[in-house]
Image (spheres, grey):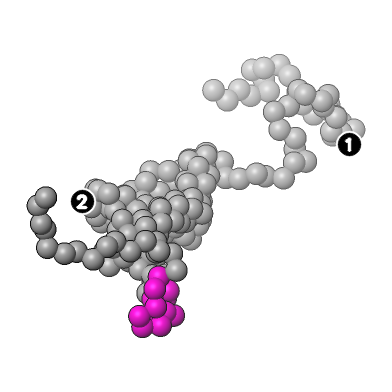
Amino acid sequence: MTETVAETGFDFSDLDTAEVTEKERPAGTSRSSSNAPATGARRGRKPRQSRLTDLQKKLSGEMFKAGALVGLPLPVTGYYIAQESNDFTVALVELASYRPEWINALEQIAKLEPGLVVGRTAIGIGAAAAVDRKRATPDSFVMAFLGVKKAYDAIQAKRMPGEVDPNASSYNPPPAGTFTPV
């Protein structure tokens, strides 16, 4: 496909290269400016391995925490999510490694921790209210996981022996006697 000067009939030797200057392009005709800094990796180029490893570890940790929260109402599902968190995230990052937009999306997903903390705290507030109202016991695994048992134990340690719970009702039922029909 290479053509010689004899075949094309055009000789480039008469061009003056000293007068060649870059022309300014009109605004809006180019997709990107040549002066703009690079915003990221191009498609097909793999990011640094350390970046991918850090992303995988972060995703695995977030998935494990999510599995622990899901495990409160659904123990087998939560255990499975936590168990598979590492293998799943390794495969996911490997699949996304050549797609920078996927890597960026996964980095956003890896920032779930604040949401998980808010969710855990909201569930914990409900559980603590249930303990205060004597609707739940603070000794269960769920209460320990949510931190309610720790708060309950701290409150109990500050009470004097025989001291009445200040949140308890002041109503005392009448003493139970023997039943006598009328």
Residue 141 in sight: no
Q: Earlier in the sequence, mark 2 or mark 1?
A: 1
The residues bearing labels 2 and 1 have C-alpha atoms spaced at a distance of 75 Å
Q: Is residue 163 magenta?
A: yes
Which image quadrant: the N terminus? top right
Residue 138 vertical placement versus 123 (above, below): below
Q: Nearer the viewer, residue 48 or 115?
A: 115
Q: How many marks?
A: 2
Residue drawn at point x = 44 percent, y = 56 percent: 125
- Residue type, label 2: Val
For label 2, the SS is: helix
On screen, 98 above or below 80?
above
Q: Quadrant of residue 53?
A: bottom left
Span highlighted in magenta in the image: 154-165
Tell me where residue 110 appears, x and y as whole percent.
Answer: 47, 51
In the current view of this chain or complex, which residue is farthest to the right? Answer: 19
Going by the numbered disc 1, the residue's amino acid type is Ala
How far from the left and from the top, in percent, is residue 96? 43, 43
* Outermost residue to the bottom: 161
Q: Where is 109 relative to 117, above or below? A: above
Q: Residues within 10 Å of mark 1 (few under 14, many from 20)?
A: few
Quadrant of res 171: bottom left
**Residue at 82% from the left image edge and 25% from the top image edge:** 27
Instruction: Pick whichever, 132 or 57, lies toward us.
Output: 132
The residue pinned by badge 1 equals: 18
The percent position of residue 73, horizontal first and vertical second, equals 27, 49
Residue 9 seen in render: yes
Mark 2, residue position: 76
Q: Secondary structure at mark 1?
A: helix
Left or right: residue 146 compared with residue 177: right
Report x, y in % for residue 122: 45, 52
159 part of magenta stretch? yes
